[in-house]
Structure formats: structure tokens, C-alpha cells
Image (cartoon, rainbow, N blue to C red):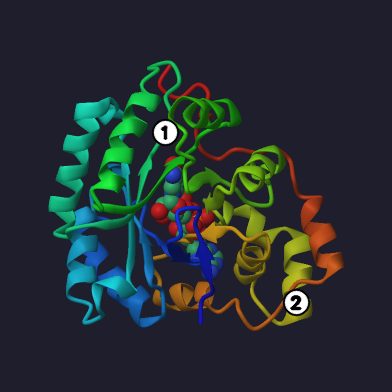
Amino acid sequence: MVPSIRLNNGTSLPQLGFGVYKIGDDEVAGVVRTAIEAGYRAIDTATLYANERGVGEAVRTSGLPREELFVTTKLWNTEHGYDSALRAFDTSLSELGLDYVDLYLIHWPLPSLDKYVETWRALEKIASDGRAKAIGVSNFQIPHLERLIEETGTVPAVNQIECHPWLQQPLLRDFHEKHEIVTEAWGPLARGGDLLADEKITTIAGKHGKTPAQVVLRWHIEMNHLVIPKSVTPERIEENMDVFDFALDAHDGAAIATLEQGKRLGPDPDTLGS
Ligand code: NAD
């Protein structure tokens, strides 16, 4: 059973969900069905991923009550601004074929565009209309969060950021904790490349009889992150869910802490869009 994480507006999300970046719209419904059968109840999509239609289809035809599934989507960079954000949200809901989402996020702050506060006001309206159960942001840095809070008084429920053992984000996580913002980790496996072959990770995996991916996901769980690994392979989809029967010890935690190297695999939020 996946534990829930409580958000600052009183709603909750399953701590481990399923990411669908780069899964095509034709394929995604089948993959999400596999994930739901494996026990996932939260799905993370975005307008950018161009697969909201298929995600919605899988949710609507799952046979589960809507309130047992949790859908996140995100506003794309071209839709910043109050009116455009409201329109973008309508389009997302209609693509999904749903009458609400559980979490709606601003995908990137685009500080040089200087519209994220205005966009955030549209998300406040969407939340007050009950069409998003919770609202949050993604890829926001501390100054962007400070400005949102200062100018609107509404603290994002979640900040979805690139986070993995190579980029542990201590300052941002600390800020989140102080302001009751939940850290959601994207790219949690560092996209499945060399990190999973790192000797420190493979040694910990061998000790616990788990796989490297399971060790990294367990690290996220113990850091209280929301975490949304992606895979299209049924065995890995199951493997990534099977992280609730072991715990890392202090030596494991200390070894993983040494992997920090400030290594981003995605864009820098301060400069994207400049
Ligand atoms: P990830 O770290 O989840 O890595 C996924 C890749 O890792 C897979 O494609 C596969 O190659 C490999 N993998 C998965 N399970 C494995 C296993 N058990 N063993 C070995 N390899 C395995 O990276 P991601 O997809 O970039 O991030 C996860 C989700 O986060 C995305 O699908 C998306 O929903 C979200 N995301 C958000 C943003 C954002 O800007 N907000 C950016 C990127 C991703």
C-alpha cells in the first residue's frame, strides 16, 4: 500500500505515482492501465507531453471510482498569463475528459517573461472553482516561490523539481519544509542512466536484495518526496512500485548523500525562456 502525503490545503496524494513524459498518446492508455493494475493511483502528465487524451481515457475506463485516482497536469510555457492560463486549463480538462484534476502545476516559471504571478492568480481561481483539488508549481526556485507567496498569499501545495542523488536540492527542500510545500521529484532515477550503475547504489542494492532503481526510489520515499518514476516496461513498472518492504540504514543514507554533484539533466529554471 502506497502511503499518502498530505498537502497544505488538506488534500492528499499517493506518495509514489507514475510519470508519462515521452509516452505517445496512442500508447499511453495501455501503459497507464498496466500501472494502475500494478497499484499506482497517481498519474503525472502535462500539456507538453501531448498525451492527456490517452491518460484521461485510462482513468475513465479503469473501473475505479474517480476519487481513487489522482491526476496531475501542467500549464505549458506558451500559456502564461491570466486569461491564457484559464483557457489552457479548459483545454486540458477537455483533453482528459475529466471534470477536475487533483493537481494543476505551472510547468516552468520563465522568470524573464515575468508572468508567473499573473498565471498563479488564474490557478487560484481554478482551485476556488473546485476544478483543481490542489495547485502548485514546477521548477520554481526560491526567489520565485518567495514572490508568489508575498504577492498572492497562496503557498503552492507542491513544487515539482528535478531531484535525484546527483542533484539533491538541499536549499530548495529546506525552503519547502519551512513553508509546507511538498517536494515532488521529477527525473527521480536520473532518467535511468549511469546513476543506477554507480557502485555505491549497486552495493546498497545488493545488501538489501533490491535493484538499484528500488534503492533510489526508497531514498526519495524516506526523504518524504512525492515521486513519479516513468517506465513503459511492465516489469519495471512493477519493480518501481515494490519499494515498501525495506528501509535504508544510516550508512546507506550517508553513502547516497556523497553522490550530490549539482548535476542537472534538464534545463536551468533561471534561464529557460530567456
Ligand atoms: P525518470 O528518472 O523517471 O527515468 C525514467 C527512465 O528510467 C525510463 O525511461 C527508463 O529508461 C529508466 N527506468 C525506469 N525504471 C527503471 C528501472 N526499474 N530500472 C532501470 N531503469 C529504469 O525520468 P523522467 O521520466 O524524466 O521523470 C519522471 C516523470 O517526471 C516524467 O515521466 C514526468 O511525468 C515528470 N517530469 C517532469 C518534468 C518537469 O519539468 N516538471 C520534467 C521531466 C519529467
Which residue type does callout 2 highlight? Answer: Gly
Q: Residue at x 63, y 61 (%)?
A: 224
Residue 83 on image: x %, y %? 19, 28
Residue 114 on image: x %, y %? 40, 17
Q: Dot 2 corresponds to which residue?
A: 206
Q: Evaluate whether residue 128 shows in this view.
A: yes
The image shows residue 30, relative to residue 145, as above or below, that is: below
Q: CA distance from mark 1 to mark 2?
A: 38 Å
Residue 51 on image: x %, y %? 23, 53
Q: Dot 1 corresponds to which residue?
A: 108
The quarter of the image holding the C terminus is top left
Q: Residue at x 79, y 78 (%)?
A: 207
Q: Residue at x 20, y 29 (%)?
A: 84
Instruction: Please identify, in this view, whether the residue under mark 1 or under mark 2 is nearer the observer.
Output: 1
Q: Residue at x 54, y 74 (%)?
A: 3
For label 1, the SS is: loop
Q: Evaluate whether residue 167 shows in this view.
A: no
Name the N-terminal-most of marks 1 and 2: 1
For label 2, the SS is: helix
